[in-house]
């Protein structure tokens, strides 16, 4: 990983204006949601029984952390183009997993400030608004937040390697991106059908809603552990599905002269 990070730092140093502009974009993106919830709660009151402004601030912070993590590895969007153009060959001969090399070769370090800002928002909200928390709830919410990044990122990886069969499949990518807006809302207040979708198929509920509830003790320690167990089962299934599709996709790629 160190060579990838070193190359990313060198690349960012060459385009300082773009680097700072992207950082500003990340700060504005997170700030918009903070202002949005301040206006909403100030105008119509709390968003559901458990979601007043301080708790919505915590949710916004966790979403910022999650988004920042997967923005770092956002080169995954280019995978369909690499497959369709035949450039995947240059990665298949590397002594590492070709997809891992392809994703990491263009790390987006500009997203790190978004992660830092998310952590600051969570910490400030908990301390400033005197929300309840314990050391255990901090650890559990942190684990859920990190695992949620993996659980949300893997469907994106699976979607990208569908190019072996579907081509670029821009319509699927666009749908995926549009659904991401839901992670900014407290999904516990949504109808059950939406909860199932955002827990099982696209686990956005783990990006902001659940870590915020676990941290502020809206959920018990036992419930936090159960959420982690659900994430681990989900991630295991996603990895198995990815390995199956990757193996089948490579055989199809090679059969066409890739």
Image: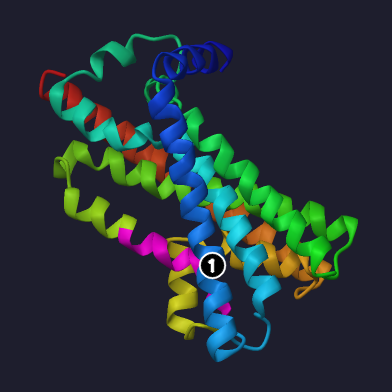
The N terminus, quarter of image: top right
The C terminus, quarter of image: top left
At 17% from the left and 47% from the top, the residue drawn is 169
* Corner quadrant of residue 186: bottom right
Above or below, 24 relative to 233: above
Principal secondary structure, stretch drawn in magenta: helix
* Corner quadrant of residue 208: bottom right
* Magenta stretch bounds: 178-188
Q: Can residue 47 be seen at all in this image of the molecule?
A: no
| Image coords of residue 107 (percent x, y) | 45, 26
In-front residue for pair 151/187: 187
At 15% from the left and 29% from the top, the residue drawn is 84
| Image coords of residue 35 (percent x, y) | 54, 67
Above or below, 83 relative to 47: above
At 43% from the left and 68% from the top, the residue drawn is 182
Above or below, 131 relative to 236: below
| Image coords of residue 190 (percent x, y) | 49, 82
In-front residue for pair 9/178: 9
Report the number of discs. Answer: 1
The residue sitting at the right extreme is 135
At 72% from the left and 51% from the top, the residue drawn is 142
- Residue under label 1, please give it: 35
| Image coords of residue 136 (percent x, y) | 87, 57
Q: Can residue 189 be seen at all in this image of the molecule?
A: yes
In-front residue for pair 109/234: 109
Q: Give the color scheme: rainbow, by chain, secondary structure or one colour.
A: rainbow
The residue sitting at the front extreme is 17
Above or below, 1 relative to 40: above
| Label 1 Cα neighbours within 10 Å, binned few <14 / some 14-19 / many ≥20 | few
Q: Is residue 203 left or right of residue 76?
A: right
Residue 193 located within the stretch drawn in magenta? no
């Amino acid at each position: 990983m160190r060579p990838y990070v070193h190359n990313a730092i060198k690349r960012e140093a060459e385009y300082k204006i773009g680097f700072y502009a992207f950082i500003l974009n990340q700060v504005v993106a997170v700030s918009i949601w903070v202002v949005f919830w301040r206006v909403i709660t100030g105008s119509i009151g709390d968003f559901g029984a458990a979601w007043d402004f301080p708790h919505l601030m915590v949710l916004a912070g966790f979403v910022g952390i999650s988004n920042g993590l997967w923005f770092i590895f956002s080169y995954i969007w280019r995978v369909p183009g690499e497959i369709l153009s035949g450039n995947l060959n240059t990665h298949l001969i590397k002594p590492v997993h070709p997809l891992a090399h392809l994703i990491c070769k263009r790390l987006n370090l500009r997203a790190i400030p978004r992660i830092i800002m998310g952590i600051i928002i969570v910490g400030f909200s908990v301390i400033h608004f005197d929300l309840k928390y314990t050391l255990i709830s901090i650890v559990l919410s942190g684990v859920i937040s990190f695992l949620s990044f993996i659980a949300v990122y893997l469907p994106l990886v699976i979607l990208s390697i569908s190019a072996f069969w579907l081509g670029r499949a821009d319509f699927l990518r666009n749908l995926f991106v549009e659904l991401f807006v839901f992670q900014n809302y407290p999904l516990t207040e949504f109808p059950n059908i939406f909860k199932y979708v955002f827990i099982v198929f696209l686990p956005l509920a783990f990006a902001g809603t659940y870590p915020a509830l676990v941290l502020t003790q809206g959920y018990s320690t036992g419930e936090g552990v159960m959420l982690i167990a659900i994430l681990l089962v989900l991630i295991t299934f996603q990895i198995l599905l990815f390995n199956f599709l990757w193996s089948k996709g490579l055989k199809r790629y090679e059969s066409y002269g890739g």
